[in-house]
Amino acid sequence: MSIIQNWRLYESRYNLVGSVCRTCGKQYFPKSSFCSKCGSDKLTDETFSKEGTVYSFSKVNVSPYLFQKQTPYVVALIKLKNGPLITSQIVDSEAEKIKIGQKVKAVFRKISDEKKGEIISYGIKFRLL
């Protein structure tokens, strides 16, 4: 990811800022410029809760290049409190201790380091409460 792309994602990546359709109420994370449900382009920014519930999860043993140093890790679908369903890693816990329905909270962690000498990306991951 380039420095410019990283900067553009800053608000979403660090603060869980997404969008809400003013026409039908559908929520999006990350931000969207139009609603895939009703087709409206009338969306507003909204900061979603940093707490949620594990909807589903999987342990990743073979990962893409950017995440090889983190393997094995857990990736989950998380239903944010008063927000959309998002995908994120769950950290600071073994996969065997994670259960569907458990409460989680957003924490700030390293996402990836692409190549030596380039950008180290940080952002939101989740941990069990």
Image: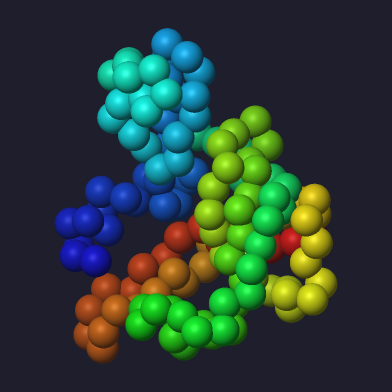
As drawn, which residue projects farthest toward the top? 23
Residue 101 spot, x, y in % from top left: 80, 51
Asked if 39 appears above or below 81 in the picture, the reply is above
Q: Quadrant of the N terminus?
A: bottom left
Residue 96 vs residue 114, the one in the foreground: 96
Is 94 on the left-hand or right-hand side of 38?
Answer: right
Residue 89 image-quadrant placement: bottom right
Residue, x 69% and y 50% (percent of image)? 55
Asked if 2 appears above or below 64 in the picture, the reply is above
Residue 83 spot, x, y in % from top left: 59, 34
Is 16 on the left-hand or right-hand side of 113?
Answer: right
Residue, x 52% and y 68% (percent of image)? 109
Residue 129 vs residue 60, the one in the foreground: 60
Q: Is residue 105 something that shows in the picture?
A: no
Q: How is the image coloured?
A: rainbow
Residue 44 spot, x, y in % from top left: 38, 22
Residue 88 spot, x, y in % from top left: 54, 59
Total labels: the figure holds: 0
Residue, x 37% and y 37% (percent of image)? 31
Is 76 on the left-hand or right-hand side of 62?
Answer: right
Residue, x 45% and y 35% (percent of image)? 28
Q: Is residue 109 something that shows in the picture?
A: yes
Q: Quadrant of the C terminus?
A: bottom right
